[in-house]
Image: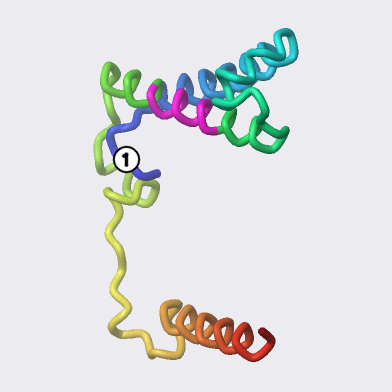
Amino acid sequence: MLWKGATPAGGFWGLLAGTASSIGMWAWVKLSPGAIAYVALSSHASDMAQNMYRALWSWIVCVAVTVVVSVFTKARPEIELEGLVYGATRIPSEKQIPLIHRPSFWAVVVTVVFLALNYYFW
């Protein structure tokens, strides 16, 4: 969605490698509790910290494998990616839309109300 150089094979193998690495780290820690010092960078990490570090390592593996496989496989033409990938999609202009119908206007309104309520109820 964010990189037009990613290929279907890169996405598949990246997701597979990320999922496999997460399962592998989980099994490694279950079989050898001392392995948590390598996975979570601390031998005293809580369960939540272990999960966060395992997710981080899995994401790094996923992205690395996706990039490497995508570099060595043929990317789809940019015309096929229009509407699917951010860099290959023309973003429509909001100039002709009235201010009250623009998402950015409502984002500002919600932010101001949120801050006002937080200040009032603090």
Q: Is residue 102 above or below residue 26?
A: below
Residue that numbered label 1 is attached to: 3
Amino acid type, callout 1:
Trp
Magenta segment main secondary structure = helix
Q: In terms of depth relative to the viewer, which is nearer, 109 or 87?
A: 109
Q: Quadrant of the C terminus?
A: bottom right
The quarter of the displayed image where residue 53 is located: top right
Q: Residue furthest top?
A: 31
The x, y position of residue 74, in whole percent, is 27, 22
Q: Quadrant of the N terminus?
A: top left
The quarter of the displayed image where residue 63 is located: top left
The x, y position of residue 112, in whole percent, is 51, 86
Q: Residue at x 26, y 43 (%)?
A: 79
Dot 1: what SS? loop
Q: In terms of depth relative to the viewer, which is nearer, 13 or 41?
A: 41
Image: magenta residue range: 56-64
